[in-house]
Image (cartoon, grey):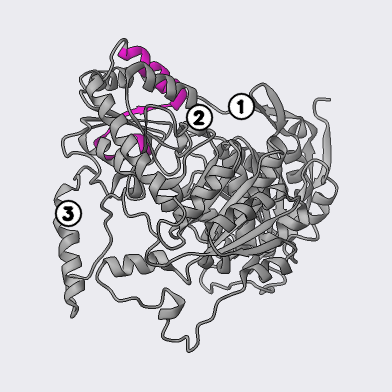
Amino acid sequence: MPGETIRLTTAQAIVRYLAAQFIEIDGVRTRLCGGGFGIFGHGNVTCLGEALYGRQDALPLYRGQNEQSMGFAAAAYAKYHLRRRFMFCTASAGPGTANLLTASALAHANRLPMLMLCGDTFLTRLPDPVLQQLEHFGNPTLGVNDAFKAVTRYWDRITHPAQVIQSLPAALAVMLDPADCGPAFLGLPQDVQGWTYDYPASFFDERVHRIRRQAPDTGEVAEAAVALAGAKRPVLIAGGGVQYSGAVAELTAFAEAHGIPVVETIAGRANLLATHPLNAGPIGVTGSDSANAVAEAADVVLAVGTRLQDFTTGSWTAFAQDARLVSINAARHDAGKHLSLPVVGDAKLGLTALGAALGGYRAPETWTEFARDERRKWDAYVAENVRPGNRPNSYAQAIGVVNDLCGSRDRVVAAAGGLPAEVTANWRTLGVGTVDVEFGFSCMGYEIAGGWGARIAQAEAEPDADTIVFVGDGSYLLMNSDIYSSVLTGKKLIILVLDNGGFAVINKLQNNTGNESFNNLIADCPTVPEPFAVDFAAHAAAMGARSEVVANPSELAEAFRRAKAADRTSVIVMSVDAYDGWTTQGHAWWEVGTPAVSDSAKVRAAHADVEAARVRQRRGV
């Protein structure tokens, strides 16, 4: 009835509101918030915990082992659902909340929705200073939670129960916005969580959300069409935004109608199947010779749904100096980068409008065939690169084994270290949207936690598929406790631990810039008197996983088959070579800071090589 109210605590109102929010996906109505990840402490257990207990059927709460990994899992869940569903994370005041900072930064960099409901100090300040409170003598309002302002798209501190009526819808609006999507943070003072208010009952009515599709400006489309219509060597860069828009079919149709080769960013991997004749491969620093050759020769570059990160652009050396850039993006900030002709709008609508404006334009067949020929050469290189026995055990060989044995809907997760480059370059896409290589924030520790979050989402939608995690020994040691989480919750993972004895990819960068190996490989740490190998299989087994050690790719294949058949998380460990196991082709120039002055002749020579390549760098802002 109009005017009807219901008395609830602040925490109860937040939970009740979240449980009433739905979204329509492909004609099916489903709950917008898939639940949450939580570790309770004095800052959130008594009030928010009480509220969540009463709604656990609608908002299942997964008990985390580490707040940072909870955030990684939430990000992977959102990525699987193409930003159309999200999870919340709740942490106690103080260090529990501070542990979420890195995960929030990851979600911010990757433009992923995640809601953080975090404890805060008391609004009244009567008990101050309280346990785990940071005191700023000149500003008593400042605390740990204020640090999240730099790594969120929406930030608020709830200082009165009525504030929820404005703040929660505003947070959801940001998380669902194609242009501004990212994490939202609500600080919840411990006293305010339990305060009551007579909320309008209508605030808790069920609501169905839909993702906004912004139509592009007709003038921008027309200008972009003129640029493309004059192209003799066009290329299309497909980013992660293509999948978030649900525009894979439109991208494919656009490329086929106009004969334009497609290259993929890391976030855009798995927009096209590996076998598509217009798929020229992954572009950039961790890309392919084929895509980089096409990009370097292109005269018009159409970027769709990408923020043009330096690994995509080769620090802006991947394209000719006089190449014209056109960018379709829902975010104005991304659409105008490097003096691009911007088409600000949804990728699906933008590609459709631009395709109509182009009419019967087709790229010259000689250009399209050039791209196909380059891809054929790259495919031959990858086939040899992943072949077992071609050199000591390598990342590429392990990737090739798994690629041959996995299903078309199995999901692959990797992040940071050397594996993003190796997966991006060597993985042959079997199914659209099945690759999650976290390289927006390049965050070690995402792999297993992200795999758990992805599996929670995948189990809802594709229970017969598997989530496969590639992780190095360095990232495993940083964050591995969600092996236990996956076992506890029955969310099966297949985890490949590829042990190269330390931070081998950074050791490679160290050596490639003329430096001696130092403090990256365990064997090269001056403070380690007696290096020894971690028994990863035993460690994983202690957390309840099936585990085994394999000596080579042949044994890996048999172990992977056993893992596929198993009903719980499996961890397979294989040692790989730290020096001779890398993919050597497919790299673009990448700008890193090198010493201009050094006692080492090798360092000086490497610096000179880096600077010599700078002449190819575009100067657009």
- Foreground residue among 27 and 172: 27
Mark 3, residue position: 613
Q: Position of residue 171 (x, y in %)?
A: 60, 42
Q: Which stretch appears magenta?
A: 333-358
Mark 1, residue position: 210
Residue 352 counted in the magenta span: yes
The mark that comes first in sequence, 1 or 3, is 1
The mark that comes first in sequence, 2 or 1, is 1
The image quadrant where one finds the N terminus is: top right
Residue density around tag 1, few if under 14, some if 14–19, many if 20 or more, within 10 Å? few
Residue at (61% x, 51% y) in the render? 451
Mark 2, residue position: 245
- Residue type, numbered disc 3: Ala
Circle nearer the viewer, 1 or 3 = 3
The mark that comes first in sequence, 2 or 3, is 2
Vertical arrangement, residue 216 with respect to residue 290, above or below? above
Q: Secondary structure at mark 1?
A: loop
Is 131 left or right of 501, judged from the image as shown?
right
Distance, label 1 to label 3, CA atoms, is: 47 Å
The residue most toward the bottom is 529
Q: Position of residue 439 (x, y in %)?
A: 45, 51
Q: Secondary structure at mark 2?
A: loop
